Image: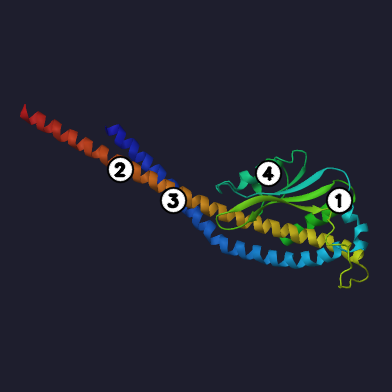
């Protein structure tokens, strides 16, 4: 009986330690959510404006001759954005599950977990800067024009709400034609194709930065929910173990009293 009480006490201490850890990580995630979602929303606003301009350019007949809109061969290059840490529910697992559906893709990882999975890349998604995005965009645009790959995609996690985040792929290059091909009222100088070719690296850079920020917001939201769930489970386990511990102590005390009474009667 004494061994059972000691074992229960040890298990309670162990689960309590886990509870403190999950609460701490949940608080850290909660403190990051506001800034992460604010940065995500700013990027969404920027990309909405950028997409409007790009849609006008892609609808121009002149831009159909742009090398960024010409299909080519050479396979898939995929920028995979995952988290810097674990304990975020299914966040990283969902990213890697979707990435596994492109087994022949050449992967550029962003985030420590992605680098651990796919090799050398950018080790932090949280610290991935605008300068990093510009450098990646320049490199990938140059490689696309050189015919090193057929299409470029960004595998990221789309933030829907604090409860829901969805792994998705955004195809970036080649650009797809939009609209009915009618000339837009906007005047581009010197011409639409020249402006498009000059704008593509900035467009890819902005899109990549937006995807990284959205993924990071999804990561901290997923971690917050996972830590809340783990904390509730840990507290329930502690309550159950405490009940077992109290019963074991009560039984031990009852047994001692019974033995004392029996001994004194002899």
- Tell me residue 14's x, y (percent): 41, 42
> Which residue was labeled with disc 1?
144
> Which residue was labeled with disc 3?
20
> Which residue was labeled with disc 2?
243
Q: Compute the Cα span from label 2 to label 1.
A: 64 Å
Q: Is residue 30 above or below residue 189?
A: above
Q: Is there CB contact under 8 Å for labels 2 and 4?
A: no
Can residue 131 be seen here? The reply is no
Residue at 80% in and 50% down:
152
Q: Is there CB contact under 8 Å for labels 1 and 3?
A: no
Residue at 77% in and 59% down:
205
Nearer to us in this view, 110 or 10: 110
How busy is the neighbourhood of tag 2: few (under 14 within 10 Å), some, or many (20 plus)? Answer: few
Which badge, 2 or 1, is on the more N-terminal residue? 1
Q: Compute the Cα span from label 2 to label 4.
A: 44 Å
Q: Compute the Cα span from label 1 to label 3.
A: 49 Å
Q: Compute the Cα span from label 3 to label 4.
A: 33 Å
| Foreground label between 2 and 4 | 4
- Tell me residue 258's x, y (percent): 14, 32
Per the rendering, the mark at residue 98 is 4
What is the secondary structure assignment of the residue under circle 1? Answer: helix
């Amino acid at each position: 009986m004494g061994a059972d009480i000691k074992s229960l006490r040890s298990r309670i201490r162990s689960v309590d330690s886990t509870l403190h850890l999950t609460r701490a990580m949940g608080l850290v995630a909660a403190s990051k959510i506001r800034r992460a979602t604010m940065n995500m929303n700013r990027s969404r606003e920027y990309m909405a404006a950028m997409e409007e301009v790009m849609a006008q350019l892609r609808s121009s007949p002149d831009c159909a001759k742009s090398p960024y809109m010409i299909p080519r061969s050479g396979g898939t290059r995929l920028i995979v954005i995952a988290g810097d840490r674990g304990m975020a529910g299914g966040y990283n697992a969902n990213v890697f599950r979707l990435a596994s559906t492109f087994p022949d893709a050449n992967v550029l990882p962003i985030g420590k977990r992605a680098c651990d999975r796919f090799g050398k890349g950018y080790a932090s998604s949280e610290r991935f800067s605008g300068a990093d995005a510009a450098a990646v965009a320049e490199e990938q645009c140059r490689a696309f024009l050189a015919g090193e790959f057929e299409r470029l995609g960004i595998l990221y996690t789309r933030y829907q709400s604090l409860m829901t985040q969805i792994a998705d792929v955004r195809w970036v290059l080649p650009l797809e034609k939009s609209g009915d091909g009618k000339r837009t009222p906007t005047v581009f100088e010197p011409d639409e194709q020249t402006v498009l070719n000059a704008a593509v690296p900035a467009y890819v850079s902005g899109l990549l930065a937006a995807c990284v920020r959205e993924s990071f917001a999804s990561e901290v939201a997923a971690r917050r929910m996972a830590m809340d769930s783990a904390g509730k489970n840990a507290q329930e386990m502690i309550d159950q173990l405490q009940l077992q511990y109290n019963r074991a102590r009560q039984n031990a005390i009852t047994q001692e009293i019974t033995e004392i009474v029996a001994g004194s009667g002899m």
